[in-house]
């Protein structure tokens, strides 16, 4: 409803709705069901409509609200988003400030190191660049849409989780009184209308490297340096999960002497603790000489991690994902999933290994145990007491030989 604002009208109006100032500045007087009255403004910046919270009626006069609205409108006419230009108002919090206030509360609930890392990394590196400087009471659904739309198709699982994390941060802001509902990151009837529907994770597998591309990809990986490249190589050779490899520590590795290696048929054992395993059980992995070459020498680093980040901590999942993307972009044909056409990701390398094992009719039990999967019926599981370490060592050596053997086309060149 457009109205000529007067002091008397603003003091006496009680019907809950938004009233628009007739001076055409986009100034809004919002009366809520609770009776609370506040100033808002709706503007268009570079073709995009935004909404701003200007403050409560009891602390900002009509003249002050109109003056602020005029300044904001002038900035918008120059293509400048007023939300990033205004001085922080007393008592207002930015999304970044609220995120850092909320994270310790949320992280205290989590026990999985991977989830702790993902919560912090996604909010700080994916959400903050767009939302970080905005006051939480000014964020609207299209702001959240801007954050998610860039990764919604290619990295759907990451985007889906990020949306939930943003929603949690903003729910915290609402509970603390930093902003009023509704939550602009809510899905039903909100972002569900702005983003395309994607199949759920149960319907959609992680993008896997095609088996026909595996040798070419492996050749490209081996010419790269750094902890990320070495970690990805061990991930490929052992068919492990990203968190398992990135979290590998020196005290988990047992290297055999020459006689013991000859007796066992492999060079060592990597014992992964239950806390880092999806199935929450200790898992042994046979190590080959090639895997030990990628693992390197304990004396080369002061970190407890075999593949440390630049600051000595655990590598982030994004490091391996980014490396996969660079390898994809550096190849003329690229490395994509056969079904979805999406760029292959580290977790999809496990599917590549499983396809190879199945196509070559290798032991299903050995392959599933190497992947740390449960298989068969509950009765079969109850009687399956061995982890088939020796048989898995043979299987993984065949997988290594497959990757190391050149294709016919490569031999010709």
Image (cartoon, rainbow, N blue to C red):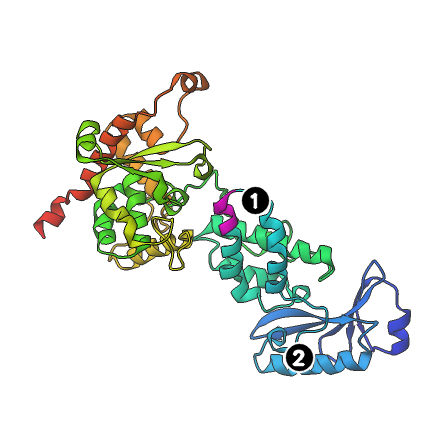
Residue 276: which quarter of the image? top left
Under tag 2, what secondary structure?
helix
- Say whether residue 132 is magenta: no
Horizontally, residue 400 falls left or right of residue 18, namely left
- Circle 2 is placed at which residue position? 72
- Residue 200 is situated, as x and y percent measured from the top left of the image, at 50, 42
- Residue 275 is situated, as x and y percent measured from the top left of the image, at 47, 37
- Asked if residue 160 shows in the view, the reply is no
- Asked if residue 92 shows in the view, the reply is yes
- Circle 1 is placed at which residue position? 110
Extent of the magenta region: 112-117
- Residue 66 is situated, as x and y percent measured from the top left of the image, at 76, 80
Magenta stretch: dominant secondary structure: helix
Residue furthest to the left in view is: 412
- Residue 72 is situated, as x and y percent measured from the top left of the image, at 66, 79
Determine whether 386 is above or below 10 in the image: above
Q: Mark 2 against mark 1, which lies toward the viewer?
A: 1
Q: Residues within 10 Å of mark 1 (few under 14, many from 20)?
A: few
Residue nearest the viewer, comparing 271 with 23: 271
- Residue at 54%, 63% in the rendered image: 128
- Say whether residue 113 is magenta: yes
- Residue at 70%, 82% in the rendered image: 70
Q: Residues within 10 Å of mark 2 (few under 14, many from 20)?
A: many
Horizontally, residue 69 falls left or right of residue 293, namely right
Spatial CA distance of label 2 from label 1 is: 42 Å
- Residue at 45%, 32% in the rendered image: 279
């Amino acid at each position: 409803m457009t109205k000529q604002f007067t002091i008397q009208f603003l003091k006496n109006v009680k019907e809950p709705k938004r009233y628009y100032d007739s001076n055409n500045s986009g100034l809004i007087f919002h009366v809520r069901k609770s009776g609370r009255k506040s100033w808002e403004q709706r503007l268009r910046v570079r073709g995009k409509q935004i909404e701003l919270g200007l403050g409560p009626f009891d602390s900002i006069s009509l003249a002050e609200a109109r003056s602020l609205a005029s300044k904001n409108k002038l900035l918008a006419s120059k293509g400048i988003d007023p939300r990033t230009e205004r001085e922080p108002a007393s008592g207002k919090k930015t999304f970044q400030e609220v995120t850092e206030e909320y994270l310790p509360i949320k992280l205290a609930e989590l026990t999985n190191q991977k989830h702790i890392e993902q919560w912090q990394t996604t909010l700080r590196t994916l959400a903050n660049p767009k939302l970080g400087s905005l006051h939480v009471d000014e964020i609207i659904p299209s702001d959240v849409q801007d954050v998610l739309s860039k990764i919604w198709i290619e990295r759907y699982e990451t985007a889906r989780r990020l949306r939930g994390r943003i929603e949690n941060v903003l729910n915290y802001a609402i509970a603390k009184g930093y902003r009023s509902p509704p939550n602009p990151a809510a899905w039903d009837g909100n972002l569900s209308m702005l983003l395309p529907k994607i199949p759920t994770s149960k319907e959609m597998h992680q993008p896997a490297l095609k088996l026909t591309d595996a040798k070419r990809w492996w050749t490209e990986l081996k010419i790269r340096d750094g902890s990320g490249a070495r970690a990805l190589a061990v991930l490929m050779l052992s068919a492990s999960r990203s968190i398992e490899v990135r979290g590998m520590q020196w005290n988990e590795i047992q290297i055999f002497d020459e006689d013991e290696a000859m007796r066992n048929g492999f060079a060592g054992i990597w014992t992964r603790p239950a806390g880092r395993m999806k199935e929450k059980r200790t898992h042994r992995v046979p190590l080959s000489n090639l895997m030990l070459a990628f693992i390197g020498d304990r004396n080369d680093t002061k970190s407890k991690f075999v593949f440390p980040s630049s600051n000595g901590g655990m590598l982030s999942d994004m490091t391996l994902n980014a490396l996969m993307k660079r390898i994809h972009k550096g190849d003329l044909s690229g490395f994509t999933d056969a079904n979805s056409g999406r760029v292959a990701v580290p977790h999809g390398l496990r599917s590549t290994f499983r396809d190879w094992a199945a196509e070559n009719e290798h032991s299903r039990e050995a392959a599933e145990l190497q992947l740390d999967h449960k298989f068969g019926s509950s009765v079969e599981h109850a009687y399956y007491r061995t982890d088939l370490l020796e048989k898995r060592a043979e299987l993984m050596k065949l997988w290594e030989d497959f990757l190391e053997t050149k294709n016919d086309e490569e031999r010709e060149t």
